[in-house]
Image (cartoon, rainbow, N blue to C red):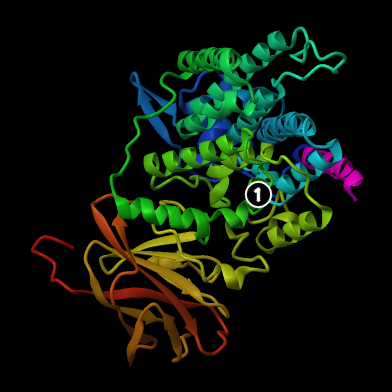
């Protein structure tokens, strides 16, 4: 079984390459917002050799996809609009987009990922047998959303590839001990120091490109010299070479696109940081086990006394840095599984194992990952990633995990402003309807998240004439039921204390969150429209307040 691991890994990479070469399924246009912005930025570099957003970019997108771009994110730099997208991954994708305007991003992502996996394979094979190293990488890739990332029009796959390549090169720079012929000399082979310095320089260059795309990766690359297992003067030389490489790439990105980062805007809110830590571990959409379950086994396979523990600490520091600097967007802000933003940190863990995995635990790990990833396994290119977790075999269990109240964007979320409160519903059980309403579909329960700047004591939900009379609610007490003369039914919900309280992701101070689960006792024959018509507060609103 273990000898088949290299074949499986190569076959998986080949399948990803074939998927990138095949024509897009359906429209396959980038999703509005972050994906469209990154696609336009990379295409602009490929065609116009700049990152300015102008009419030619809009016309090019319209000619290619048949629809104008939506949700383009721009920043004002020296009087011109520039794309709010990382320049380094856009520049890496530009050559492929020039050759293949529709498939270029996927080709660039798959190629970069294949190179990074190959380097990681070589690095792991230095301390494990090559088949064992291949097996670990196969499970890490197939058992997470990493295999799906290249098929999203997002920089995540490219930044993850830069991160993994930089760390793998640092590991490969470890000097090999020469064959012990005598006891007089047991140092590195001649030329090993020179080749190691060159690899550190290249690793630093790639690390600088990754950091230019995501500032929160900076703590991660402190582990570069530690990963190679050198000490004393060799470690200082490694740090100097890596630092020079990183500085060179940051200067190059600055010359191309100006300052690589916007000024961070951290929020000093202990409750917000606490809940973000909870959601990073057990969130319904952004929890690590959903998209990166092999991370647990990767950390367990590390050994004390090696650079592995330093790498784990660096990943943890980067995650904490990310939660602090990006408290409302830490999981990523693109369509698809919300964890795409955390993919570079997960990829760094691929270099941890110091001992091989047995075949059976690897198979069990893949099977457990499939509980949430099954829809993406069936259709990695054309599956509906916004609903992948909600439609997997583990959907009933996942529905009981807490909804991330701190994230501005979540996959499958529908947002409405009703009765003076913010209402966020989640597909597939609840979907958007005409006229600003929501629509509950059967037979499963739907999740509703209500946010208010003031404490609420109750809500009234109005359902259309298709609604049965038996409503089950979790998170509130069901009060009066009112039949409307014109048809339809209203339910009073009595609320207790808010479940979560922290700074609002939409600004305006603190928000109080009330998660609700709605389900009718009988089977719905058709979707039922509803809306929040009344929100009762514990303290009456002051004059002039909503």
Q: Quadrant of residue 378?
A: bottom right
Q: Main secondary structure of the magenta part?
A: helix
**Magenta-span inclusion, residue 463:** no
**Magenta-span inclusion, residue 8:** yes
Q: Residues within 10 Å of mark 1 (few under 14, many from 20)?
A: few
Q: Quadrant of residue 158?
A: top right
Q: Quadrant of residue 478?
A: bottom left
Residue 493, x across and y down, in percent:
32, 82
Q: Is residue 433 above or below residue 486?
A: above
Residue topped by disc 1: 300
Q: Residue furthest front?
A: 183
Residue 178 horizontal side relative to residue 512, left or right: right
Residue located 39% across and 77% down the image: 475
Residue located 78% across and 49% down the image: 357
Residue located 24% across and 51% down the image: 508
Q: Residue furthest left?
A: 543
Closer to the camera in the image, 182 or 278: 182
Residue 2, x across and y down, in percent:
88, 47
Residue 191, x across and y down, in percent:
75, 7
Closer to the camera in the image, 132 or 102: 132
Closer to the camera in the image, 228 or 418: 228
Asked if one can make out residue 83 in the rendered structure from this viewpoint, the answer is: yes
Span of residues in magenta? 1-18
């Amino acid at each position: 079984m273990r000898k088949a691991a290299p074949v499986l890994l190569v076959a998986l990479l080949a399948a990803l390459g074939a998927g990138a070469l095949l024509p897009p399924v359906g429209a396959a246009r980038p999703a509005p917002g972050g994906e469209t912005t990154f696609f336009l930025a990379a295409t602009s570099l490929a065609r116009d050799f700049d990152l300015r957003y102008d009419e030619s970019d809009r016309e090019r997108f319209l000619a290619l996809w048949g629809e104008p771009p939506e949700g383009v994110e721009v920043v004002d730099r020296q009087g011109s609009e520039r794309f709010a997208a990382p320049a380094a991954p856009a520049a890496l994708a530009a050559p492929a987009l020039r050759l293949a305007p529709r498939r270029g991003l996927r080709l660039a992502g798959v190629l970069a990922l294949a190179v990074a996996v190959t380097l990681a394979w070589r690095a792991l094979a230095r301390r494990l047998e090559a088949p064992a190293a291949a097996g670990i990488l196969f499970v890490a890739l197939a058992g997470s959303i990493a295999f799906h990332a290249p098929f999203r029009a997002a920089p995540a796959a490219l930044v993850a590839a830069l991160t993994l390549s930089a760390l793998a090169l640092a590991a490969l720079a470890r000097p090999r001990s020469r064959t012990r012929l005598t006891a007089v000399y047991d140092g590195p082979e001649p030329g090993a120091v020179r080749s190691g310095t060159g690899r550190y320089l290249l690793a630093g260059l790639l690390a600088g490109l990754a950091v230019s795309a995501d500032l929160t990766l900076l703590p991660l690359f402190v582990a570069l010299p530690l990963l190679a297992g050198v000490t004393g003067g060799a470690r200082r030389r490694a740090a100097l070479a890596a630092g020079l490489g990183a500085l060179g790439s940051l200067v190059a990105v600055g010359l191309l696109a100006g300052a690589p980062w916007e000024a961070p805007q951290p929020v000093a809110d202990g409750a917000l940081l606490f809940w973000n830590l909870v959601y990073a571990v057990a969130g319904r959409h952004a929890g690590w086990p959903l998209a990166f379950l092999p991370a647990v086994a990767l950390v367990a396979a590390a050994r004390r006394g090696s650079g592995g523990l330093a790498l784990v600490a660096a990943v943890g520091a980067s995650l904490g840095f990310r939660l602090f600097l990006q408290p409302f967007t830490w999981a990523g802000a693109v369509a698809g599984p919300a964890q795409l933003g955390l993919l570079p940190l997960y990829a760094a863990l691929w270099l941890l194992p110091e001992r091989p995995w047995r075949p059976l635990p690897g198979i069990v790990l893949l099977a457990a990952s499939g509980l949430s990833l099954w829809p993406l396994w069936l259709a990695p290119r054309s599956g509906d990633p916004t609903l992948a977790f909600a439609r997997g075999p583990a959907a009933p269990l996942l529905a009981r995990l807490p909804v991330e109240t701190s994230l501005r964007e979540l996959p499958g979320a529908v947002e409405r402003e009703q009765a003076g409160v913010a209402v966020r519903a989640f597909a597939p059980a609840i979907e958007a309807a005409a006229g600003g309403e929501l629509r509950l579909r059967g037979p499963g329960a739907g999740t509703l998240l209500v946010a208010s700047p003031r404490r609420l004591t109750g809500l009234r939900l109005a359902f259309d004439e298709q609604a049965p009379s038996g409503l089950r609610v979790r998170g509130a007490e069901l009060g009066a039921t009112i039949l409307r003369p014109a048809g339809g039914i209203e339910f009073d919900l009595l609320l207790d204390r808010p479940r979560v309280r922290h700074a609002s992701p939409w600004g305006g101070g603190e928000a109080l969150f009330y998660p609700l689960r709605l389900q009718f006792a009988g089977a719905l024959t058709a979707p039922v429209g509803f809306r929040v018509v009344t929100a009762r507060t514990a303290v009456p609103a002051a004059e002039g307040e909503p």
